[in-house]
């Protein structure tokens, strides 16, 4: 075979190999570049997520702080109202009573009707305030019944606030649990009578 033919053959055989190597290297560089870009974006997203998480945590913290501040303000207002009533600055204008099912603090339909009357009166007369005392029968421990009495009074306060917009500073609650029965606890009727919330509508002297 002539020398020129050998060179042409060599070139025909080597050029595809060189192209394969060249494009293979180029493809590897391209892939590596894309991987680096993707990793950069992932890292950037991680940092953004971290920043957002920090902002959410800060917002939650501020919301919780505001909630605690609001609850403290409500507590102080109710304590001030209690003292004013105790000092005789308010007089009783009317008294109502609602009852609850055994071991429950959800309002019955009858209870809501009574509260609707009180809520309407308080809406029209913003100088009036309300004392809400929770009571239970004697079944259960004294500690549990104090909590149950509190929850019954709290359900009344929440209902009047949400439905009629009565300021929480115009209502205060107290729980006596089983300590102030109005009937004997040795009968179903007596226990049913004791499962109650007493409502005292008060006005300034």
Image: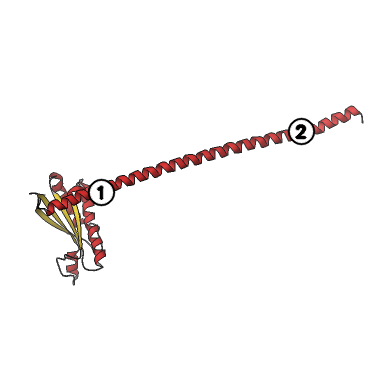
Residue 77 appears in the picture as rendered = yes
Q: Earlier in the sequence, mark 2 or mark 1?
A: 2
User: Pointer 2: residues within 10 angstroms few (<14), some, or many (20+)?
Assistant: few
Give percent across and percent down for residue 99.
19, 60
Give percent across and percent down for residue 112.
20, 54
SS of the residue at dot 2?
helix
Q: Is residue 75 left or right of residue 201?
A: right
Residue name at image x 20 percent, y 55 percent: 173
**Number of the label disc, if any, that sits on residue 72:** 1
The number of discs equals: 2
Residue name at image x 50 percent, y 41 percent: 46
Give percent across and percent down for residue 202.
11, 51
Q: Is residue 56 above or below residue 153?
A: above
Q: Which residue is mark 2?
A: 18
Between marks 2 and 1, how big is the CA–CA gap?
A: 80 Å
The N terminus: image quadrant: top right
Give percent across and percent down for residue 29.
66, 35
């Amino acid at each position: 075979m002539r020398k020129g033919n050998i060179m042409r053959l060599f070139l025909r055989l080597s050029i595809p190999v060189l192209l394969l190597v060249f494009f293979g290297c180029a493809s590897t560089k391209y892939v590596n570049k894309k991987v680096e870009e993707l990793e950069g974006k992932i890292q950037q997203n991680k940092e953004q997520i971290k920043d957002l998480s920090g902002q959410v945590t800060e917002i939650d913290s501020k919301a919780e702080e505001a909630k605690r501040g609001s609850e403290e303000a409500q507590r102080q207002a109710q304590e001030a109202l209690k003292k004013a009533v105790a000092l005789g600055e308010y007089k009783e204008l009317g008294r109502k009573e609602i009852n609850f099912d055994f071991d429950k603090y959800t309002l019955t339909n009858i209870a809501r009707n009574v509260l609707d009357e009180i809520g309407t009166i308080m809406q029209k007369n913003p100088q009036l305030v309300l004392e809400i005392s929770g009571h239970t029968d004697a079944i259960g421990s004294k500690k549990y019944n104090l909590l149950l009495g509190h929850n019954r009074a709290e359900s009344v306060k929440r209902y009047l606030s949400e439905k009629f917009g009565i300021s929480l500073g115009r209502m205060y609650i107290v729980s006596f649990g089983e300590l102030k029965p109005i009937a004997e606890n040795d009968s179903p009727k007596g226990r049913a009578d004791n499962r109650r919330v007493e409502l005292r509508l008060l006005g300034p002297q």
